[in-house]
Amino acid sequence: METQIQSAWQLFMTHAEFPIMICRISTARVEETNQRGLDAFGYPLSFLKASHFSDFLVSGNPNEWEEQIALKKAGLSDKWDTKIICRKNEIKSVEIKFIEIQALEDVCLIRIKEQETEDQKVRALKKQLSFYETILMQMPTEFAVLNAKWQYLFVSHNSIKDPEFREWMIGKTDYDFCRYRNKDYSIAENRHKQYNELARTKTKKEWIDEHKTADGGTKYVLRKLYPYFIDGELQMNFGFGIDITERINAEKEREKILRDMTIQNEELKQFAHITSHDLKEPLRTIASFTNILKRRYAGSFDEKGNEYMQFVVDSADRMGNLLTGLRSFVTVDLDRIEEKITDINTQKAISDAIANLKLRIEETHTNITLPTNYPNIKGHPQFFTQLFQNLILNAIKFCKKRPEIRIDWAEQTDFFQFSVQDNGIGIDDKYKERIFKLFNRLDRGKYEGTGVGLAICKKVVQLHHGSMWVESDGISGSTFFFTVKKNYLN
Amino acid sequence: MDRTVPCIMLIDDDRATTVYNEIIIEEHGAAKNIIIYNSPEEALIYLTTPFTDKKISPDLILLDINMPRMDGWEFIEAYKEAQKEGLANITIVMLSTTADKREYEMVETNELLSGIKSKPLSFEALDEILDIHFNNLSLTKSS
C-alpha cells in the first residue's frame, strides 16, 4: 500500500504542470524535484540535489528562507514573490508556495510559479497585435480608420495593396490621396461632404462610390462609415468599402429585363385590344351582309349555296364570340386588380354570381349548396364575382342531369381555399391542365362556349397570388379548387 | 309601332355600315328620308348651311364613334359650336362596336347625346329609339 502511494506520488510529481521541489526545512537543501523543476532551473538533478534552495534566491535578503518558513508555520502566509537565479545567470520572477510542510520530518514541499518577464509580456503583446492586424488586414472588405480630422489612422490591405503607399496614407487625408495619385479632387470633396454630414448628424453614413475601371467598366463600392464617440466627442470613424459591382450589375440587368418586359407586355395588351376590338368591326359587316344576303337572296341560291352561306354566318358568329371572350380575358389585368384591391365579403360575391345566373339556374333546376359561413378576403370584388360566376356556369354547362353544385371553403395558414363541386361529366386526367388554357375546348360542338371562362378564372386567381386546379374521377363530376392569399399585400 | 320620322341622317366613315343601316331603316320603315354621309366634316357642312324645302333637316342622327379624321366625340364638339350659331336641336344617337360601360357613361353625361346603341343596327334598336325619343311624334300623327 505504502509503495503504491509512493509510486502514485512519483507519477504526480512527473506529470505536474509546474515545478515542485522537496526541501529540508532547516537547511533548505533540495532533496527532490520534478521535470518542470529541472526545466525551470536548467540544471541537472545531481547539481540541484547538491544545492540549497536558499542559494538560488536572489532578493538580497539572507534570511528570506527562514522568515518565510516562520510565516508559514505561524499560519500567516504560505507564499511569496521573489526572484531566483537559474542557469546562465538568468533571473526569473517567481511565486513560491508551500504546499506541505512537515516540521518533525524537517521536510517541505514547494511549488514554483514563474512570473512573466517584460520580454515575455512584449512578445505576447506583439503576438496579440499581429493577430488583430491580420484580422484587420485580411478583412474581405476595404477597411480604414479615420480620426476626427479625417486623417487616416489605419488602412487595410484590401483598400490599398501597395504596402509603401499604405504606409504613406497614415496621417494623410483624401485630398492628399487625390494629389498623390493625381486624381480628380471631386472624389475627396464628395467624401468630405459625407464626413461633414456624419459630423453634423452624428449617425453612420452610407453611400455608393462609382469608379471607372481600366477596362472602361464601372466599379461600384458601397461605403459605410461608422462614427465612434467618447463623451459625445467624435474620436474615430470606421469606414468600410464593399464591392457591390456584381450586385448592381445584376440589378441593372433585372431592371432592363423588367423594362423590356413592360414594353412587350404593353404591346401585347395593345395587340389583344386591337384584335378583340378592331377586328370586330369588319367581322360585324361580314355577318350583317351575309344575313341580308340570306334574307333577300335565299331563293336565288340552291341548297348547297344556302348551306355555305350558313357556314359563313356561323363562323362569323363564333369568331365574334371568340373576340368577345378575348376581350374579357385581357380585361382581367394586373393594373386593374391592384387599383381595386379591397375587402371582399365572399358571401356577397357568391350571391352576386348566383343572381347574375338566376335565369340559367332556374331553367336547369340547378341546386346549389352554400357554406354556412363565409370568410372575408382581400381582392378585386368584380373579378371575384366573375370567378364564381364562371365556375357555377361551367358546372351547369357540363352536366347531363340536374346540376348539383356545392360551394365550400377552408382556411389554411396563408390562404383561403375555395371549392366548387359539381355532378357533371367530369374531366379526364390528361385534360386537367389544358382546360385552363385560353380558347381550349374539349367537346367542341357538344357543349356551348368559347374556352375563355376557365382561362379567366385561372388568371383572376393568379392575380390574387393563388393557384387553381381541378380534381375529378373522370365520371361523376369535378371539383374546382382555388386559393387566394389571405393578405394580398404580403 | 309603325312610326316614321321624316328624316334620319347616317354618319359613318364605313360605307358598308351606312349601306347596311340604310337597308335596315328601309326594311323597318323608320324614316321617310335617309341622308347618308361617310364624312363627318361634310355632314357638318350640311347641318350648318340653311335648310330649304329640298334640303331638309334630319330629325335623328345616327352617329358612328370610331372615325379616323373626326371621331364621333369631335363631331359633337363641332356640332355644339354650330348650335351657338342657331342650329336647332336634333336627336343624336351614337352607334358603337364596343358600346362598353365607359362609352355609356360618356354618352349619359353628354347633354347633346340622346343614347348609344351597339352595332349592328337592329329593328329592336330602332324601335327603342323611336319609343323613347319620338313618342309624341306618333301621337301627333295619329291625332
Image (cartoon, coloured by chain):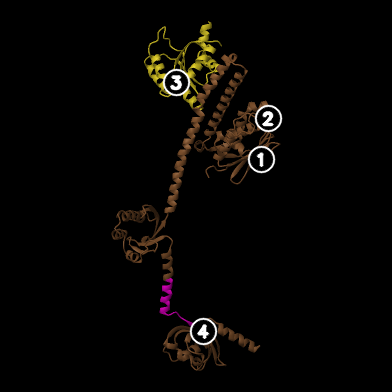
Q: Which residues are magenta?
A: A111-128
Please tell me how many numbered marks the rendered image carries. 4
- Camera-side residue: A375 or A247? A247
Q: Nearer the viewer, residue A177 or A41?
A: A177
Q: Is residue B114 visible?
A: no
Q: What mark, if any, has residue A429 been given in the picture?
A: 1
Q: Residues within 10 Å of mark 1 (few under 14, many from 20)?
A: few
Q: Point out which mark residue A36 bears.
A: 4
Q: Amino acid at mark 1?
A: Asp
Based on the picture, tell me whether residue B110 belongs to the magenta stretch.
Answer: no
Dot label at residue A48: none
**Circle 3: is it few (<14), some (14-19), or many (20+) Cα within 10 Å?**
many
The extreme top residue here reads: B143
Q: Chain of mark 2?
A: A
Instruction: Confirm or deny contact between disc 3 and disc 2 (CB under 8 A).
Output: no
Residue A474 point in image, percent of width and height: 69, 38
Residue A135's x, y, as percent? 43, 66
Q: Pointer 4 indicates a residue of which chain?
A: A
Q: Quadrant of residue A360?
A: top right
Within-10-Å neighbours for mark 4: few <14, some 14–19, many 20+: some
Q: Residue at x 52, y 43 (%)?
A: A489
Q: Which chain is brown?
A: A
User: How far across and down, in percent of the image, does residue A250 sit?
Assistant: 45, 50
Badge 3 and badge 2 in a common chain: no
Earlier-in-chain disc, 1 versus 2: 2
